Amino acid sequence: MTRPEGPPRAAIFGCQGHRLTEDERAFFARVNPLGFILFKRNVNDPDQVRALVAEMRETVDDSNTPVLIDQEGGRVQRLGPPHWPDRPPAAAFARQARHDPAAAAEDLGGTARAIGYDLADLGITVDCWPVLDLPQADADPVIGDRALGTTPEMIAELGRVVIDGLAAAGVSPVIKHLPGHGRATVDSHETLPRVETDRETLRRTDFRPFLALNDVLWGMTAHVVYDAVDPARCATFSPAVIDGVIRGEIGFGGLLVSDDLSMGALSGDFAGRTRRSLEAGCDVVLHCNGDMAEMMAVARDLPAMSAAALDRLARAEAARRAGRGGGG
């Protein structure tokens, strides 16, 4: 298959199973998406995953096409026994860091490098990790033990360890969920969270880990409404959040990917979700569940990646190849 002329289009898609169907092959070849994402439903054994990754890249005729996965450890790991180790959740390292920060950093760094090597061995080049959300006691447990600490300082310190560990293995990290999901009292996979905290408090708390790590070159939005910034739209759909907070106050300059468009937090048809995300300032939309009808709706009016997004992607790929987790 020959990739269509011109830049890739601004989406990352999942697929249904262990191999691509003929319909998926034809769809990806026609749409020419930026990249792909894998889930547990796509994973059997190492040889099968390598073959699927190769198939995905063949459809767009590009061996450098990004392939993503969520491999955090704990509850969120798409690769697991018997072929890959069962890694501990982030909170285990945060607990260790309270009494022995140096040992926690060493152990977490080793885990991040090991995860990175696992992914690189399969041809996976981007890991949607670390989670930089600051958890709150009254929040929904969707973040919970995925968090790298309970203070902005600890999250930033351990987040940098994850970033450097993945980068050392040749895998790009993705910081999430910008500008912070830790106060959400409902699970955005199911319904739309609303955060009523004032902006100054958010600046002093939730935003700070992202500000400290704003040199990372991939980031993912939160499907969360922040009343103090834009009470009408969640971050993914909000120019005020993306331009004013993520790009502005936080200073994130990397490739910005929406969280999954098929999550229950969002409403409206998929063409509209796609348009609203990109118009708000996301560089790329993410659609994960592999539902062909939904993917076709996402692709209906999907534009090519902008020149600015392509530049961000190029910087991210150069950093990955150099073993750097950030832009410095």
Image: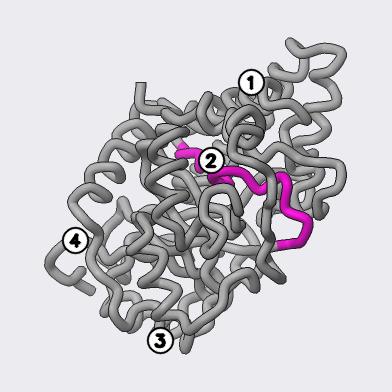
Q: Which residue is mark 4?
A: 7
Helix, strand or loop status at disc 4: loop
Q: Around disc 3, counting alpha carbons within 10 Å, would you say few (fewer than 14), some (14 to 19), or many (20 or more)?
A: few
Q: Which residue is mark 2?
A: 175
Residue 225 - label:
none
Magenta part of the protein: which range?
171-187
Snapshot quadrant of residue 42: bottom right
Q: Between 93 and 110, which is closer to the camera in this rendering?
A: 93
**Marks 3/2: CA distance?**
34 Å
Give the residue type that dot 4 points to: Pro
In the displayed structure, would residue 155 be above or below residue 174? Answer: above
Q: Earlier in the sequence, mark 4 or mark 3?
A: 4
Q: Which residue is mark 1?
A: 157
Name the chief secondary structure element in magenta. Answer: loop
Check if mark 2's residue and mark 4's residue have beta carbons within 8 Å.
no
Q: Which residue is mark 3?
A: 22
Helix, strand or loop status at disc 2: strand
Direction from residue 83 to residue 306 in the image, left or right: left
**Marks 1/2: CA distance?**
13 Å
Helix, strand or loop status at disc 1: helix
Q: Around disc 4, counting alpha carbons within 10 Å, would you say few (fewer than 14), some (14 to 19), or many (20 or more)?
A: some
Quadrant in which the N terminus is drawn: bottom left
State the residue at coordinates (63%, 27%): 204
Q: Earlier in the sequence, mark 1 or mark 4?
A: 4
State the residue at coordinates (41%, 64%): 277
> Which of pointers 3 and 1 indicates the residue nearer the eye?
1
Q: Earlier in the sequence, mark 2 or mark 4?
A: 4
Residue 81 percent coordinates (x, y)? 77, 53
